[in-house]
Amino acid sequence: DKEMICLQLFCSHSCKMTTPFIATCTCPDGLVLGPDNTTCLEKPTPKKDPQDIGCYTVSYSESRLYKVHHPLSWEECINLCNRRSSVYAGIQAEQGYPTYNFVFCGNDIKEHSTTANSSLCLPCMDDKTRLCGGQNTLSLYQLRESNPLVLYLATESGLKIFSTESLSTEALTGSSSPTTAVGLSYWEDDIFSLSHPGISRFYYSPFSDMYIESTLVFECASSVAIDWINKYIYCRRQGDSYLIEIDWTDWTRQKSPRIVMSFYYDLQDMEVDPFARKLFFVENGQLSRLSIYENLRIEYDYEKLHLKKVLKIALDVEHKFVYLIGIENDENHCLIRTDYEFKQMRVLNNEDHLTDPISLDVLKQDVIWGVKSDDGFFVYRCELTPRCLKDNIQRIYRSSEAIYDIKIYHPDKQPHNAMYLCSRLQCSHNCSVTQDQVSCTCPDGMSLSSDNVTCQDITSTTNPTSVEQSETSKVESKTTTEHYYYAASFPHFLMSTPSTAVVHEELPQEYTKAAPPSNVDTSNETSDRLAVIVTCVVGILAIVGLLLFVVWRTKHEFIPNLGNSYAQNLQLELTHSNVAAFDNVSN
């Protein structure tokens, strides 16, 4: 009957009979059918034609955003940024002459760049009707209003890309074998897939506007974590119980993978924080954390928090949160957010949509997870407000074939070094990036206060040198093959003020080095220190003199008193002796 036919479709909203034996899913006003033909989604915002919004300086973009390694035509530049789902595309002519172009893809180029004279952006060589920037300038194009949701799915038929902008699912070229895990490096345009016989790499070619067929990186089995900053892959080595670290830039395999740790059970899930260099993994339902540099493993004791088992995890490295799907002691599934130390736990949801999870990922306020059921594989999305309320849960995809892993593809998903450092600074207004340094900046009419973080009106500024001090309010980032750390050169860190203590605690202590401020006039500091030293010496001499006087006075008073006391004691002893003699005579 009609009801049974509609039930077999698993429509997310409603069902309509088109013939006595054929039914289709339908959607309410404002929604359209997604690529699975069963799930209703919001109407996508149409992707606009590239809109030229002006000529901008290039200094910010060079250090902050992705820059392609090959010179491209104008069309290839636009295609690349569209593939990366970014809002803006900045095009710069090579060496100031628009023969070939470099491209920058990002969401906030306009926000952090300054306008330049339009005459500095020149026509493109391949298309005179377009502008392709110039020396130290970008021709900035807006491609869309906001970022669509893009998911990479590891399925039994290979890797697939799901997008809410096109409402389509695209199979990745060269990926057709069952794939059990997927990893991304957004800044390098690399996709890593885990299948038989190991982990393979796909890289995007802007010339052909597609991902090139994969190359085998290493023989791995179960779970993959990608360190996109230090360019390491973490996985379990095939055939044994060792977790290994692979340098993915070593395509010739000159370096042997480094053994990180051993374990006894299979890994259910694994994530890495490349800034803190901490690896989180689930082994036999137990959540653990490994400090990679110290080789220190910590197992979380979450029984007291009424958790029986952890199934899937995801990291928010910017805010230092672990998201997990676990089973409570009463066998209910729950979505939980906690800090890295597991001291501040919050249950976000415990609905039926979490049963039998296959994957979990998070981006800002959006949580994405997939579940397996008898009716297929479903992908859900929930916006945190701040909890994941039942009304906020939205089904976005259904598949009849098996889905094993899901990863969000987004410009803000994997912070760049500078992006991360800006978030650590916690500037009150703007964060400026120049080469490998970041600093807080203020809008017109305001200047930095003495903490080099907070902006205040210039009219109320009591320290006229605060603008100059902002030059020293920089955070330098340095990444090597062995260590990642950043050094803070804030003069106010030397002061014991509440504001500086908060900022200082935000920095990862184990990888922080304090660097002295550069280009700062220290003549006043030297004179102040000399005055303090003289004052201390005079004070010490005064204390020593006072002590000598007390000793001398005590000595002269103590000796006469001692003599009188001795005479009195002697007289008392003689008196007692006389009494004793008198008693003897009487007897």
Image (tube, helix red, strand yellow):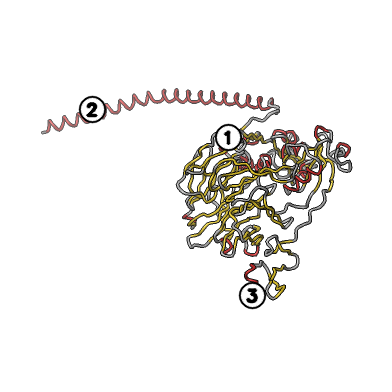
| 4, 131: nearer the viewer | 4
Give how far across and how far down residue 352 sits, in percent: 57, 64
Considering the image in quadrants, where does the C terminus appear? Answer: top left
Q: Quadrant of residue 69?
A: top right
Asked whether residue 222 is in view, the answer is yes
Asked whether residue 460 is in view, the answer is no
Residue at the (81%, 45%) spot, across then down: 141
Q: In the image, 303: left or right of 513?
A: left
Amino acid at pointer 3: Glu
Residue under pointer 1? 253
Q: Earlier in the sequence, mark 1 or mark 3?
A: 3
> Dots 3 and 2: beta carbons under 8 Å?
no
Q: Quadrant of residue 4?
A: bottom right
| 154, 91: nearer the viewer | 154
Q: Nearer the viewer, mark 2 or mark 1?
A: 1
Residue at the (69%, 55%) spot, across then down: 169
Local packing at callout 2 (Cα closer than 10 Å; few below 14, some 14-19, many 20+) is few
